[in-house]
Image (cartoon, rainbow, N blue to C red):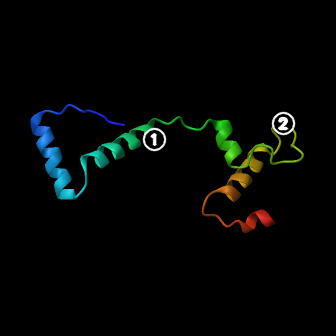
Amino acid sequence: MTLTVRLDPDLEREFAATCRIKGTTKSTVVTELIRGYVQAKAPAMSPFELAEAMGLVGCQERAPAAGRDHSRYLRAKLRNTRPGKLRERRAR
């Protein structure tokens, strides 16, 4: 795709000089900036999607009574699924 961007002459000179100094092309810089912008605007996961990704949805065969031990169960589950934690806990 071709994209045309209008820059004032001073900015265009500074941009071209910076690209030469850094050894990159203008196209590469613009592509990286657009990619970063699009990724930053990507919709965040919903709470349900986060819980599902962490394995909290449908992970218990028998649910405890409503409210009873709910907080304790979630804390234990989150403790075992955080990145960097030993997965050996799951085997217990």
Image location of residue 87, percent across then percent down: 70, 65
Query: Neighbour class for label 2 at 10 Å: few (<14), some, many (≥20)?
Result: few
Q: Depth check: give the residue in front, 16 or 43.
A: 16
Residue matched to label 2: 66
Q: Which amino acid does label 1 sit on?
A: Gln
Q: Residue at x 61, y 59 (%)?
A: 83
Depicted 59 relative to depicted 43: above or below: below
Q: Distance between the residues labelled 1 and 2?
A: 39 Å
The label shown at residue 22 is: none
Q: In this view, does 48 lie to the left or right of 19?
A: right
Q: Residue at x 66, y 39 (%)?
A: 49
Image location of residue 78, percent across then percent down: 68, 52
Q: Which residue is drawn at 14% across and 50% down?
A: 17
Q: Residue furthest front?
A: 1
Residue matched to label 1: 39
Q: Depth check: give the residue in front, 69 or 44.
A: 44
Secondary structure state at the residue bearing disc 2:
loop
Rendered image quadrant of residue 6: top left
Q: In which quarter of the image is the N terminus?
A: top left
Do tag 1 and tag 2 residues touch (Cβ < 8 Å)? no
Q: Depth check: give the residue in front, 60 or 25.
A: 25
Rendered image quadrant of residue 68: top right
Q: Residue at x 59, y 38 (%)?
A: 45
**For discs 1 and 2, the disc positioned in front in the rendered view:** 1
Which of the two labelled residues, at mark 1 and mark 2, occupies the earlier sequence position?
Answer: 1
Q: Which amino acid does label 2 sit on?
A: Ala
Q: In which quarter of the image is the C terminus?
A: bottom right
